[in-house]
Amino acid sequence: MKNSLIFFLILIISCQNQEVKGKICLVIDDFGYSIGSPAIDFLKLDENITIAIIPGTPYAKKIGQAAYSRNIESIIHMPMEAQETYKNNWYMLSSKLNSKEVDDRIVMAHELIPWAKGMNNHQGSKATENLELMKNVARSLKKLDLFFLDSYTNPESRAFITMRRYGVKTELRQVFLDHEESYDKILNQLDSLALLSHSMDVAIGIAHTKSLTLEVLKNEMPVLKKKGYKFVKLSDIVR
């Protein structure tokens, strides 16, 4: 009995002292269109992922509730104006809106997904380069005590620096995992994210609710954990 206790204590200490190779934050975009597979299966991957839900989609509220019940963190995946034309969404933020209209849409999105701790942009290559719009977004998020992740769909984005100036906790996406739908390419992007985490406090990657992405993450996240990588929630690393 005494030897068993000693072994157990040694095991705990060794686990606590295991070197963390790097910290990885995974954000999965585009939730809300389905409550079935593969969307719901992402919630079984790991507690330390963050899902981004598009307001105005058929299952936005249900998937938010499902995530909350599993202790999975959610954020609002806010539609924002892109350079190219795409299907409109009532919640979409654009330069045509005044400050009240921006605030109303963000408040309503949060009321729809009240578990959300923050927001990132869905598309938004045109919106995020508009300084006045980003100021209005920052003011609204500050009032709601929500953070912002700049998905960085435009290198001219003003989102990150504007959020910082207005005291909104924020971070910047480093890697898109699955813009190219190939197992090997998604795996390569995940490896790149892990490599980046060696030189950063944490590396942030964005993926999407795709079956192939789910397959890669299901196979590779346990491998990365065994190698000493730690997965963290977005709310734990924004500043």
Image: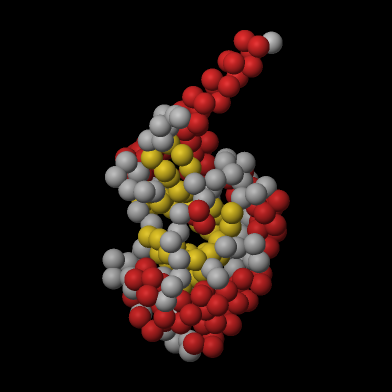
Give percent across and percent down for residue 149. 44, 63
| Residue 199 position within the rendered picture, expressed as x and y whole percent measured from the top left | 29, 45
Taking 82 as reference, is 40 left or right? Answer: right
Q: How many marks?
A: 0
State the residue at coordinates (53%, 48%): 49
**Residue 6 visible within the image:** yes
Establish if 30 lies above or below 38: below
Q: Is residue 9 left or right of residue 199?
A: right
**How far across and down, in percent of the image, does residue 152 sit?**
36, 63
Above or below 150: residue 101: below
Q: Residue at x 54, y 20 (%)?
A: 10
Q: At x 45% / y 59%, what residue is drawn?
A: 238
Q: Is residue 65 above or below residue 114?
A: above
In front of the other: 58 or 201: 201
Q: Coloured how?
A: secondary structure
Q: Nearer the viewer, residue 46 or 141?
A: 141
**Which quadrant, please, contains the C terminus?**
bottom left
Quadrant (top left/top right/bottom left/bottom right) for the N terminus? top right
- Image coords of residue 65 (percent x, y): 70, 57
**Residue at image x 36%, y 48%?**
201
Q: Is residue 219 visible?
A: no
Q: In which quarter of the view is residue 85 placed? A: bottom left
In the orientation shown, which residue stands out farthest toward the front? 2
